[in-house]
Amino acid sequence: MVRQERVDSWFRSAFSDCRLAFRLLCKSPAFTTIAVLTLALGIGACSAIFSVVYGVLERPLPYPNADRVVRVYMHFHPQDMDYGTMSPADFQDWETQNRSFETLGIFNEAAPFEIDGKSESELVPGAFVTAGFFSTLGERPLVGRVFLPADDKMDSTNVVVLSENLWRRLFSASPDAIGQSLRLNGEAYTVVGVMPLSFRLPSEKDELWANYPLDPAAKRSGWFSYGIARLKPGVTLEQAQTEVNEIGRRIEQANPMWYSDLTLPLVPLRESIVGNVQPALLLMFGAVFFVLLITVANVSNLLLVRATSRVREVAIRRSLGAGPARIALQFTLESTLLALVGGTLGACLAYCGVKASQVWHPANLPRVEDIRLDGIALAFTCIVTLAAAVSSSLLPALLSLRVDLNLALKKGKSASIGNRSRLRPHSVLVVSEIALSVALLVGAGLLVRSFLQLQRVDAGFHAPPENILGLKLWITRAKPVDSAGRIAIFESLLKKVAFCRELELQLSQEPFRQMEAL
């Protein structure tokens, strides 16, 4: 009974303190607004960048045991690419001599497939893949089936697996799409399956996968393919790398006129998808974390200034019997309320930031679909909010305990907190803010300098970059064109481009001609 009364008394006291903290904050709307907005910006930016970093670098891939899947490249002279391509003949030699992988496949990221429609054709990104491509990833189809080993043979019929988006667009998500015929690049393909939205390989933009027939008597040509494989249980990446390099040496010895210094680099699947964005993302997260620290220091400074004006209030409460812990708790509750409101608003800003990153899609950021403000990101936001509340209230709460009651009651607001301290808290906060800001500015300056140096790299041509335009051009098969016709189309295009360039030069010189006439 006594214990229950103590618990009830504690709850009543806590509720009273919370209500008092709320009233005190409402009496200072300017201070409260500034503190909340400051915390919201810092927490929102940090949570948004955390969502991006976690979604791109840490969120598990949607494939069973994806940490045991690797992409296989080919490096040799004279190709001299660190992560080059292989030919179907190289893949078949590797498949025959393999001992480290339980499944393996090959894929060719071809030019966009042209889907022949009733009124007009449509270019859709896709890839040619073998049956081992799907079995290695272990992803189940949404409808139908994936490729079978029989689909890899030269005498197999043309079959295709669609993405869920393409299936909904072409067949309105009808299960009857399985078995229907689809004309790709002028040839008939039979739809055998549909993959879910989570399946986004080898490229995140791929919308269909056609079977990749392999010729057992294929020659060393057509180096446009990549390998993918799943390690056997108990086999490490280093052991597999040693074995495939031995296979590469045997291929090189059997084909000395084609290869020298041949190796087969293995890259974990996650690393192959993420690429080289990890350092940039971590650097960005570090910079935003510095901003959050500056934010907390700013709010702590505001709270400390506010605490100095409440010396008489603290002295009266202590003289009426409030203990040091109760006074410290009051300051902590006020900071917690500010952090809760700021954290809630920051979570909304983080959500908007995540949506903006998906729409903006800077620098072709990989795994954009995996960036979201989920439970993990919200838990991080809660932790950051709690840490901000405790950090910002620490100094005001501790220094409020050092109030001289007699001096405070006599002088009122003119009394100060912590006069005996050699190093004033304001100075500590100001020094911390300056140090963090300098570190942030130095990092930003180094990034700008690196960017400017990259802009000055000799690209091998001397025309001004603003005068150079790159484009990809595909000739559709809506009207069949032979090789001579394709050459004629490109020559006509080049003439038109040259004519436009000459016309531009003439127009630019016209004002000078008019001036000479005058």
Image (tube, rainbow, N blue to C red):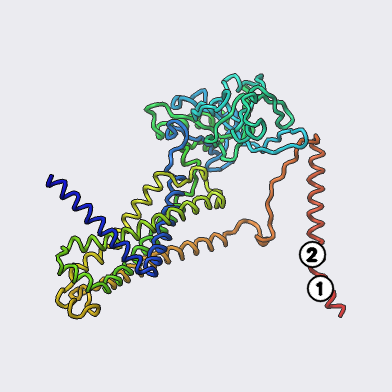
Figure quadrant of the C terminus: bottom right
> Residue 146: which quarter of the image?
top right
Mark 2 residue element: helix
Of all residues, the one furthest to the right in this rendering is 517
At x 52%, y 45%, the residue is: 368
414 vs 304, nearest the viewer = 414
The amino acid marked with disc number 1 is: Pro
- The picture places residue 465, in percent across and down from the top left corner, at 65, 60
First-in-chain label (2 vs 1): 2
- Depth check: give the residue in front, 141 or 65: 141
Residue 129 screen position, x and y as percent: 59, 30
**Most distant residue in the left direction:** 2
Res. 518 in view: yes
How far from the left and from the top, in percent, is residue 75? Answer: 53, 39
Judge whether 425 appears above or below 55 on screen.
Answer: below
- Label at residue 505: 2
CA neighbours of label 1 inside 10 A, class few (<14), some (14 to 19), many (20+): few
Residue at 82% across / 57% down in the picture?
A: 499
Element at label 1: helix
Q: Is residue 283 visible?
A: no
Position of residue 294 in the picture relative to residue 155 (left or right): left
Q: Give the vertical position of 185 relative to 152 (above or below).
A: below
Q: Could you say where residue 46 lies in the image, as x and y percent from the top left?
A: 41, 55
Residue 217 disc label = none
Q: Nearer the viewer, residue 273 or 323?
A: 323
Which amino acid type is shown beneath numbered disc 2? Leu
Q: CA distance from mark 2 to mark 1?
A: 11 Å
Residue 121, quarter of picture: top right
- For image coordinates 38% across by 51% down, the residue present is 381
Identify the disc placed on residue 511: 1
